[in-house]
Image: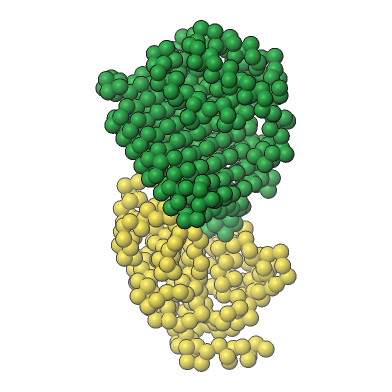
Chain colours: A yellow, B green
Amino acid sequence: MSDSPILSIRNLEAKVAEEDIHILRGVDLTLNRGEIHAIMGPNGSGKSTLSKILAGHPGYEPTGGEVLYKGEDLLEQEPDERSRNGVFFAFQYPVEIPGVSIANFLRTAMQARLEEGEELDLFDFQDQLMEAMELLEMDHSFAERSVNDGFSGGEKKRNEILQMAMLKPSLAIMDETDSGLDIDALQTVAKGVNTLAEQNPEMTILIITHYQRLLRYIQPDFVHVMVGGRIVQSGGPEVAEQLEAKGYENYKAATV
Amino acid sequence: MEGVTDSLNAEAVEALAAGEPQWLAERRRHAWSVYERTPLPTTRLEEWRYTDLRRKLKLDRLERLEWAPRSFDPASAPARLRATMEEDQEASGHLVEVDGTVVHVDLQDELAAKGVILMSLREAVSAHPELLETHLATEALPAEQGKFQALNAALWNDGIFLYVPRGVRLEHPVRVSRWVSEAGKALFSRTLIVADEASQVSFVDEVLSDDLDQQTLVSSGVEVIARPAAQVQYVSLQRLGRGAFSLIQQRTLAEKDSTLDTLNVSLGASVTRLDLNAQLRGSGANSDMLGLYFGDGDQHFDHNTSQDHVAPHAKSDLLYKGSLDEKARAVFRGIIKVHKGAQQTDAYQTNRNLLLSETARADSLPNLEIEADDVRCSHGATVGQLDQESLFYLMSRGMTRAVAERLVVIGFLGEVLSRLPLGGVSEKVTRIIRERLHG
């Protein structure tokens, strides 16, 4: 079982929900357990759409192909089922939930993973939360703040990684996690992700990014280039370096 | 003579006045004459535009609930009343009213020794005539305040009198539970709270019933007076069953350097109409005015508030938030009124509504009327739907849609409760809303 890919995307096509805007035009991608993949691409290439389709965002609609997660049809599952099954989606723009503290939010999310009638151990929870906050260099008072409400860009992204640390996913999809981060915040976030990856060697990470800079801190095993709704090149970390040097111009020219 | 019926009439006033001291009998008659000559509000009046009283309140079908001595055994009290009494143990004193008759009062001995008075309003008439003659329906809620203020002043049966002497501070809240069980009746209850200079008290008035199979009018007249430097928190928690028409008229008077905060929670009843007039009558006075409503089915809420700044250098800050599901409907109408001499007033007013269904509706009408030139005032109102991106965010963390909705709604309303963290109220209200959102 552990030899089979955790995620297998075959000829996936997708469009904007309720509109005739087709974005993904046949994506193929295979992720094995414990691997770190990065998808890079210019604006409008469909890389964020791919991550949202995987998370089950209601704004996008698959129109063809299939996605198998742990051997099962992922696209059939509701967003909350996907999460309980181990998929984590780190938002590019985390949403503000006024009046709901981070502690309450995480408690509710972790309670949702338990069987009916089972109660979350609050002492364990508190210990885990403190540990995760220390990893991300967050003050303990952070737990009592309303989720993302009035947070800086860096705080929002750190809060995403905090949730990832608590929910311990099998597959973490990080959508433009580096956007809006200064260098210090970027390093803290990267350190958090790397520590989590070391602690959970089975965890698979899919990083969606426009720029190469995050990949200097989180070393991917594989880099894919997405243009025009398809993966046009796959390789090792050297692909990202080539992109850094030459940009996306060559790919764009090639697809026209 | 609109609103005079077979049961609500001058004879009823005379029946109550018989055996009462002269001053009170005259006060009732005067209130009745105001009631008689004031027309029933129609939707042509701005203040009643969204609540068609003639359709929603069938006064002529109501029978006035008369005062009667009642024996009360807490052990055999109705389940909902018992539950709330058991929950509210930590208190300076309790008062229980059943169908318009006060059946139980207790007050900590040390507080009684310091001169604190908590008793049935009816008994207070003979026990403390001078305090009542001075305060009852005079300064705060005289009949002239309006049609229903007058009706309550004329026909009140019983109610609550709380007096806190100068400098006395109550550590725990005074808790009142008012139970209504007789359907088809009109019930008039009155509350008078006087907090003397530099005293401190918090008061929780919870009114509740099961569902009632005929329209039942529950009228509550409330007057709260904070003398200089007093600190008062008044909480009304309305948990009446369907069938009830909750009519609440409140007036609060905040004198110099006093704090007089109110929290009105409307959860029950088929129709709720709340009129709150908060007068800032002394400089340095401060009133936080909080409100929370949650409705479903075809519940109708109409909250009508007034921040009445008479004195300079006073502050009022109003926040009313509500969430409505199914076909529930809410109206908020608030006015900040700054009189000519009330310079350096700070007055804020915010009403926010969160709709959980396509058929729920909220109307928000904030208003300013400012006659002074050196003031800071603001008002704002919003009516919004449940945000799909927020729900997706929570669901992507594993919560079902129902749990996600509950978290958003409770977070939204929680802002109000966190502003007045009074023993157990916030937890109780949160629990009730959570249970209702389960359904």
Residue A142 at x, y = what percent? 36, 58
Horizontal arrangement in the rendering, residue B392 relative to residue B102 (left or right): right
Q: Quadrant of the N terminus of chain B?
A: top right
User: Which quarter of the figure has residue A80?
Assistant: bottom right
Q: Nearer the viewer, residue B418 or A56?
A: B418
Residue A36 visible in the snapshot: yes
Residue B438 visible in the snapshot: no
Residue A164 at x, y = what percent? 42, 62
Looking at the image, residue B221 lies above or below residue A68: above
Total count of labels? 0
Question: In the displayed image of the protein, which residue is found farthest to the front?
Answer: B341
Q: Quadrant of the C terminus of chain B?
A: top right
Looking at the image, residue B363 lies above or below residue B236: below
Q: Nearer the viewer, residue A241 or B336?
A: B336
x 60%, y 27%: residue: B148
Horizontal arrangement in the rendering, residue B108 relative to residue B400 (left or right): left
x 39%, y 34%: residue: B226
Horizontal arrangement in the rendering, residue B96 relative to residue B230 (left or right): right
Q: Nearer the viewer, residue B328 or B94?
A: B94
x 48%, y 20%: residue: B159
Residue B185 at x, y = what percent? 62, 18
x 40%, y 38%: residue: B255
Residue B70 at x, y = what percent? 49, 10
